């Protein structure tokens, strides 16, 4: 069990550029979640997958955000035309169906300049 | 809609002293409740969880929490704090289908020597 892996750990990008983050969950976990955390706040839910199906997506997630989990294993989160307000820590977590509580990765810190 | 309030933004305790972190939740049905801990620059680690049954739950690292339905609370406690417990602590409430969780804004714990 290598835990939940997120890459990259840090990303600095210019406003207007597109960025993509990757999350590799624990292999036997069929559920995968994306959260966003800004300084002084708790994590905010973005979206989650059960296997390859995206079951819920937050209204916080604008059309510039898209997430995929094509084969029910790793997931990517893409942000198009980044804005300064997108600067945050993006956290990925995974779990098994019926196993409440998540295992989180260490996050990807995005800075938009 | 579910929500979590952590009334204390920052708490300072002396090493060896007891600790209680407060959490109040709002949820329309029987809640699933969690406490997570986050060290600087890291993801969150699950300390303990409550679904049903005994209202006093034990977690890792010597932590426990008590669910009080009448007060809509789920406070975290530790009888004797260690310097390594300094971190940020998040309370969360989850849906019964194990989808998204809603997190509080956290309590930062400082431990004095």
Image (cartoon, coloured by chain):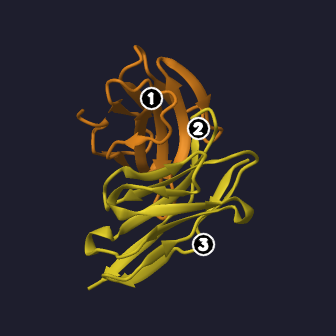
Q: Nearer the viewer, residue A84 or B97?
A: B97
For the point 58% across and 37% down, which residue is it?
A61
The colour assigned to chain B within the rendered structure: yellow
Nearer to us of marks 1 and 3 is: 1
For the point 48% across and 69% down, which residue is it?
B107
Q: CA distance from mark 1 to mark 2?
A: 24 Å
Chain ID at mark 2: A
- Residue at numbered disc 1: A96
The residue tagged with tag 2: helix, strand or loop?
loop
Q: Residues within 10 Å of mark 1 (few under 14, many from 20)?
A: some
Q: Which residue of the protein is positioned furthest toward the front in this rendering?
A: B54
Chain ID at mark 1: A
The image quarter containing residue B67 is: bottom right
Mark seen at residue A61: 2
> Would you say residue A111 is visible in this rendering?
no
The colour assigned to chain A within the rendered structure: orange
């Amino acid at each position: 069990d290598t835990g939940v892996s997120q890459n990259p750990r840090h990303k600095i990008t210019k406003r207007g550029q597109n960025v993509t983050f990757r999350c590799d969950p624990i292999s036997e976990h069929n559920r995968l979640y994306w959260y966003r955390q800004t300084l002084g706040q708790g994590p905010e839910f973005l979206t989650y997958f059960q296997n390859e199906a995206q079951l819920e997506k937050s209204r916080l997630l604008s059309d510039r955000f898209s997430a995929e989990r094509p084969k029910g294993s790793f997931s990517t989160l893409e942000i198009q035309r980044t804005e300064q307000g997108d600067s945050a820590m993006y956290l990925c977590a995974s779990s098994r169906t019926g196993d409440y509580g998540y295992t989180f990765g260490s996050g990807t810190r995005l800075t938009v300049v | 809609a579910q929500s979590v309030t952590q009334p204390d933004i920052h708490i300072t305790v002396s090493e060896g002293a007891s600790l209680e972190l407060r959490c109040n939740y709002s949820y329309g049905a029987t809640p699933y409740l969690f406490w997570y801990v986050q060290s600087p620059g890291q993801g969150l680690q699950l300390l303990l969880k409550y679904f049903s049954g005994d209202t006093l739950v034990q977690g890792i690292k010597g932590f426990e929490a008590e669910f009080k339905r009448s007060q809509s609370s789920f406070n975290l406690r530790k009888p004797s704090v260690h310097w390594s417990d300094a971190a940020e602590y998040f309370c969360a409430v989850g849906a019964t289908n194990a989808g998204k969780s809603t997190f509080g804004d956290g309590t930062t714990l400082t431990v004095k020597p």
